[in-house]
Image: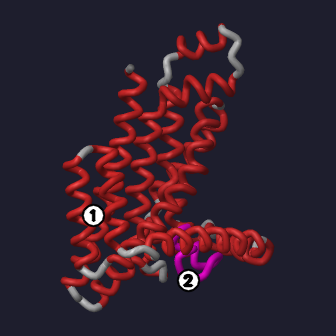
Amino acid sequence: MDPTAYRIPVGDWIDLLVDWMTDNLEWLFDGIAAFLKTLIQGLEAGFLFPPSLVIILIVTAIAFYAKGWKFALFSAVTFTIMAMMGQWQAAMSTLSLVLIASAVAVIIGVPLGIIAARNDRFSSLLRPALDLMQTLPSLVYLIPAIVFFGIGQVPGAVATVIFALPPAARLTELGLRQVDAEVVEAGEAFGAAPFKILARVQIPLALPTIMAGINQVIMLALSMVVIAGMVGAGGLGAVIFRGVTRLDIGLGFEGGLSVVIIAIFLDRLTAAFGDRASKRISK
């Protein structure tokens, strides 16, 4: 028996769905594109308007506040190296895209995790969707993003949001479900409304786990932004892509090193704020 004789045309069904969405939801995609483009370009302009030294000083101050002088020194040296390699503009473009995409992923993912933690049926429906989002090859996300949003930063941002969103939802749900039931019952016994219990008891106790999810969102966003450079998203992804296509090892290394610098900075920064949240709760 030839299995192809009973082929399931999944690809054809997806094509029909995409065609329908393109024809009927163009207004929605245009609105999303305009919104994301304004945010990304506005943040990028804010990073590039002052001299790079000013941004380096701000980054150093944030690092010192978050984790002390060692992290501040590391941040100052590495960001200076990035600027001296001539990758400053590309790095700020990548940082803008990562921050906006991560913020959107968190804004969507955390409420989904909260709903899933409070509703088992919704959780059972959400889990397979998150599994699919995490296991699909990252390049697959670029195809519908290009179809709906064209070439540029917006499809890269949309693909990044989809790719990076699952950890925010998963770890938010995990953190809320790990909150001691007796603590929640104590709040209910004192007559607190469900929203107040969520906002003042459950979320503060789950905050370290939620921060770990945000950390993972940022790391996944960085990895996807580099791939998004292939579709005209610009930034360090485009630098690395040029290095690959031209077999320019030096250019590719400079772009890759700049990505590593940004990744380490954001990773340590979010981890530091997560540690502070844990210490505050333990007190």
Q: Amino acid at mark 1?
A: Ile
Q: Quadrant of residue 283?
A: top left
Q: Nearer the viewer, residue 80 or 33?
A: 80
Q: Is residue 141 above or below residue 103?
A: below
Is any atom of residue 36 visible in this view? yes
Q: Crowding at label 1, few (<14), some or many (≥20) Cα neighbours within 10 Å?
A: some
Looking at the magenta stretch, what is its main secondary structure? helix
Q: Amino acid at mark 2?
A: Ile
Mark 1 and mark 2: span between their CA atoms?
27 Å
**Mark 2 — residue?**
151
What span is in magenta? Answer: 144-157
Q: Are marks 1 and 2 in contact (CB under 8 Å)?
A: no
**Residue 131: horizontal and vertical position, in percent?**
50, 49
Q: Is residue 15 above or below residue 265?
A: below
**Mark 1 — residue?**
261
Identified at 27% across, 64% down, the residue is 260
